[in-house]
Image (spheres, rainbow, N blue to C red):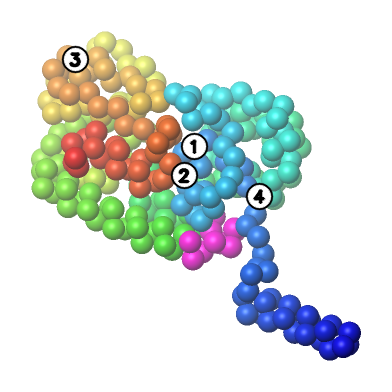
């Protein structure tokens, strides 16, 4: 009986491994630098991972890492960041992380880039099927937003936009007549931009510098976000929230 039991166990195990059963490889242990990077990681197919910079920070890249973060990244298979967070460079040096465990993503907030970045991560994580499902949902949402932009006549709506929101606003189809920031703007430059005749000033929530332009031009001032706060835990939720602020959806 012992001999036949061993044969049966081996047969079951081989079936699981060769047939893609429940003993498939586990997801990698991943740490994300900020909530924005975290949305990209989640869209790539992972759900359970820590985010280093607290989501309540207005500008998460300014986060200063803690000793507990060293332990987190040391135990992780990958640390995913955008490459522009100053605290990540210091953390990598402190934890002495090898290059092969560092993954950088481009955080430009346009659908084509988000697809490219999530596909790259999914190939690394082995989560291609989950990423493909997310991509299908994104395509559905972006199609709806493009249609809404057409109905709202975005192409004939002149706007001034913050540098860090330019790509997203252009993708939606707005008539971008000028770009400002990310650094502070002089009063003279504000007046110059206001004379361009914008219907709206679209700023960046994380480092807004366009309030004065909107006041001079007497037009609405809107702040869009890249780093999601509480309640915006998916890429679709963040994109939809920004679209609402622009008046494209209810």
Mark 2 or mark 3: name the one nearer the start of the chain. 2
Question: Residue 39 has which mark?
Answer: 2
Tag 1 secondary structure: helix
Mark 2 or mark 4: name the one nearer the start of the chain. 4
Residue 210, picture quadrant: top left
Residue 15's place in the image compared with 244, above or below, is below
Magenta residues span 120-130
Q: Out of 135 and 4, give the one closest to the viewer.
A: 4
Question: Residue 29 has which mark?
Answer: 4
Left/right placement of residue 45 relative to residue 6 reads left
Instruction: Name the residue located 36 percent from the left edge and 40 percent from the top edge.
Output: 238
Q: How crowded is mark 2: few (under 14 residues within 10 Å), some or many (20 or more)?
A: many
Q: Quadrant of the N terminus?
A: bottom right
C-beta proximity under 8 Å, tags 2 and 3: no
Instruction: Name the residue located 62 percent from the left edge and 33 percent from the top edge.
Output: 88
How far is disc 4 from disc 3 in space, using C-alphas? 48 Å
How far is disc 1 from disc 4 in space, using C-alphas? 17 Å
Q: Quadrant of the C terminus?
A: top left
The answer to whether residue 93 is seen in the rendering is: no
Label 1: which residue? 35
Question: Residue 239 has which mark?
Answer: none
Label 3: which residue? 215
Mark 4 or mark 3: name the one nearer the start of the chain. 4
C-beta proximity under 8 Å, tags 1 and 2: yes
Whether residue 180 appears in magenta in the rendering, the answer is: no
Residue 8's place in the image compared with 131, above or below, is below
Nearer the observer, disc 3 or disc 1?
Answer: 1
Nearer the observer, disc 2 or disc 3?
Answer: 2
Q: How crowded is mark 1: few (under 14 residues within 10 Å), some or many (20 or more)?
A: many
C-beta proximity under 8 Å, tags 4 and 3: no
């Amino acid at each position: 009986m012992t001999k036949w039991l061993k044969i049966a166990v081996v047969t079951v195990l081989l079936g699981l491994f060769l047939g893609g059963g429940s003993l498939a490889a586990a997801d990698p242990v991943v740490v994300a630098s900020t909530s924005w990077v975290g949305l990209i990681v989640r869209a790539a197919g992972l759900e359970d991972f820590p985010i280093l910079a607290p989501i309540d920070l207005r500008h998460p890249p300014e986060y200063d890492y803690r000793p507990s973060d060293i332990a987190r990244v040391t135990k992780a298979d990958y640390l995913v960041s955008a490459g522009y967070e100053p605290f990540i460079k210091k953390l990598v040096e402190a934890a002495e992380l090898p290059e092969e465990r560092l993954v950088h993503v481009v955080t430009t907030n346009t659908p084509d880039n988000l697809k490219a970045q999530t596909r790259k991560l999914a190939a690394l994580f082995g989560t291609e099927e989950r990423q493909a499902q997310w991509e299908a949902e994104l395509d559905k949402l972006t199609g709806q937003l493009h249609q809404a932009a057409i109905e709202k006549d975005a192409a004939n709506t002149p706007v001034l936009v913050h540098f860090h929101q330019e790509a997203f606003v252009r993708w939606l189809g707005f008539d971008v007549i000028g770009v400002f920031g990310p650094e502070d703007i002089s009063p003279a430059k504000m007046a110059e931009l206001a004379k361009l005749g914008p219907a709206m000033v679209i700023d960046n929530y994380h480092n807004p510098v366009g309030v004065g332009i909107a006041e001079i031009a007497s037009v609405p001032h809107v702040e869009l976000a890249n780093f999601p706060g509480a309640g915006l835990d998916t890429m679709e939720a963040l994109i939809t929230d920004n679209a609402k602020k622009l008046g494209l959806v209810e």
